[in-house]
Amino acid sequence: MKEIEVEKSVYITDLYCVYLSDISSAVISDLHLGFEEEMNLNGLFLPKLQRDHVEGIVEKIIERYEPEHLFINGDFKQEFKRNLPQEWEDVIHFIDRFSSQTDLIFIRGNHDNYLQTILSKRGISGLDVYEDERYYIYHGDRNLGIRKITILGHEHPSIVLRDRVGGIFKLPAFVYGPDEHVLITPAMSFFSSGTDITQSLLSDDHFTPSLKEIKDKKFRAFGITDDFGVVDFGFLLDLQRKNLSDMNPHH
């Protein structure tokens, strides 16, 4: 499926975005532009694939939904100690390409400490959080609580599937907590392998601090696949049990 409606007017999609039809908005997170240059500076050469990958998906989001607003919910860039030359180039390129097609709204993540310097060159001010009558959107690196319909990034959620001979297959995923009305978006980054949510979200040591407030771990996982689009994998506890049974040939 291209999309699944998890709450009224709230759609998770195969384009790594949440589409909020009632406010004509799409929400994405964790693009990590400039990742290649940071790796190059640390001795690991990577081809520059990230910007084309990200912008290609965003172009498809705009073509399909024509959103009036596009929220970039944190970690737009990679290096959190400074602005690298590639980040300057990639951020300006992204803004110039899409700002005429939709209203770009930047919400700060933990990697975006110096992003405002670049945004100011195009007259844009970043936000710490967005809130209206129905939605509460922030990156998730800080504990700002959960209320209304809360949309977070930061976790880089993925579903890790294991077979009985030890093979591992990882899918980017959305995580939805129906009781708390909390939704976590997958990383759009080409280089992000993601966090195994059957381990991270079912433990007591959450990567995203506000999730520690959720005592009843009723999280539902939706993986993004090339062949089938968005797939409902069910609740994480059931998925974890299934993976464990698959690894046990005597089950």
Image (cartoon, rainbow, N blue to C red):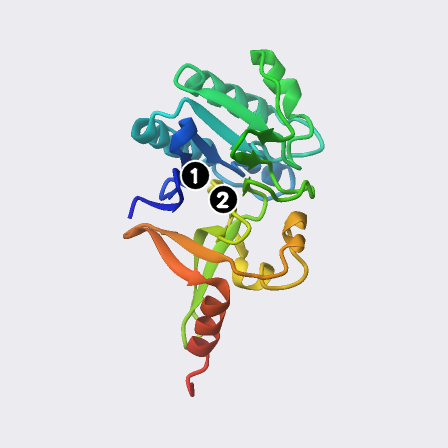
Determine if residue 48 is in view.
no
Looking at the image, is mark 2 or mark 1 earlier in the sequence?
1
Q: Quadrant of residue 249?
A: bottom left
Q: Amino acid at mark 2?
A: Thr
The disc placed on residue 76 is: none
Across and down, in percent, residue 153 comes to 55, 42
Residue 37 x/y as whole percent:
58, 34
Q: Residues within 10 Å of mark 1 (few under 14, many from 20)?
A: many
Q: Do tag 2 and tag 1 residues touch (Cβ < 8 Å)?
A: yes
Secondary structure at badge 1 equals: strand
Residue type for callout 1? Val
Q: Residue at x 57, y 36 (%)?
A: 136
Where the C terminus falls, by quadrant?
A: bottom left
* Helix, strand or loop for disc 2: loop
Percent position of residue 197, x then y: 53, 58
52 to the left or right of 151? left
Label placed on residue 18: 1
**Residue at the right extreme?**
81
* Direction from residue 80 to residue 27 in the image, left or right: left
Residue at the disc numbered 2: 185
